[in-house]
Image (cartoon, rainbow, N blue to C red):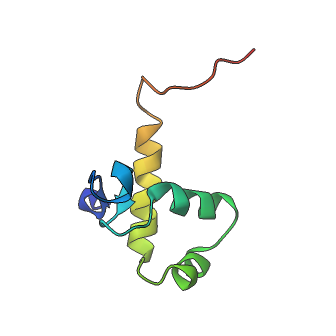
């Protein structure tokens, strides 16, 4: 995965992680995959993306949840 595909810029989308500085948040890509969309379907909906961008988004999300300090609501 090319880490330069995921960028964080306060001037773009309020600083949320985006794909290559485009106005496409990583969270949008991850949600599309979670909703069952294929890579081909995502690229058809967001033609600025490539399969590599989608893979980088998923890797970024996977790496993020490996962090020790993730704010979550404790289980009851």
Name the residue at the right extreme: 76
- Name the residue located 61 percent from the left edge and 64 percent from the top edge: 32
- Apparent side of residue 13 relative to residue 4 in the rendered image (left or right): right
The image shows residue 59, relative to residue 72, as above or below, that is below
Q: Quadrant of the C terminus?
A: top right
Number of numbered markers: 0
Q: Nearer the viewer, residue 70 or 10?
A: 10
Q: Nearer the viewer, residue 53 or 46?
A: 46
Q: Quadrant of the N terminus?
A: bottom left
Q: Position of residue 66 (x, y in %)?
A: 44, 33
| Quadrant in which residue 40 is drawn | bottom right
The image shows residue 65, relative to residue 44, as above or below, that is above
Q: Position of residue 65 (x, y in %)?
A: 48, 36
Q: Position of residue 55 (x, y in %)?
A: 44, 63
- Name the residue located 47 percent from the left edge and 27 percent from the top edge: 70
The image shows residue 36, relative to residue 59, as above or below, that is below
- Apparent side of residue 62 relative to residue 45 in the rendered image (left or right): left
Q: Position of residue 7 (x, y in %)?
A: 29, 57
- Name the residue located 56 percent from the left edge and 76 percent from the top edge: 42
- Name the residue located 41 percent from the left edge and 42 percent from the top edge: 63
């Amino acid at each position: 995965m090319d880490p330069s595909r995921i960028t964080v810029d306060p001037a773009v989308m309020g600083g949320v992680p985006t794909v290559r500085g485009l106005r496409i948040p990583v969270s949008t890509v991850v949600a599309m995959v979670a909703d069952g969309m294929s890579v081909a379907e995502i690229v058809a909906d967001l033609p600025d993306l490539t399969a590599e961008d989608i893979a980088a988004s998923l890797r970024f999300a996977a790496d993020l949840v490996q962090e020790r300090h993730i704010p979550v609501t404790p289980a009851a």
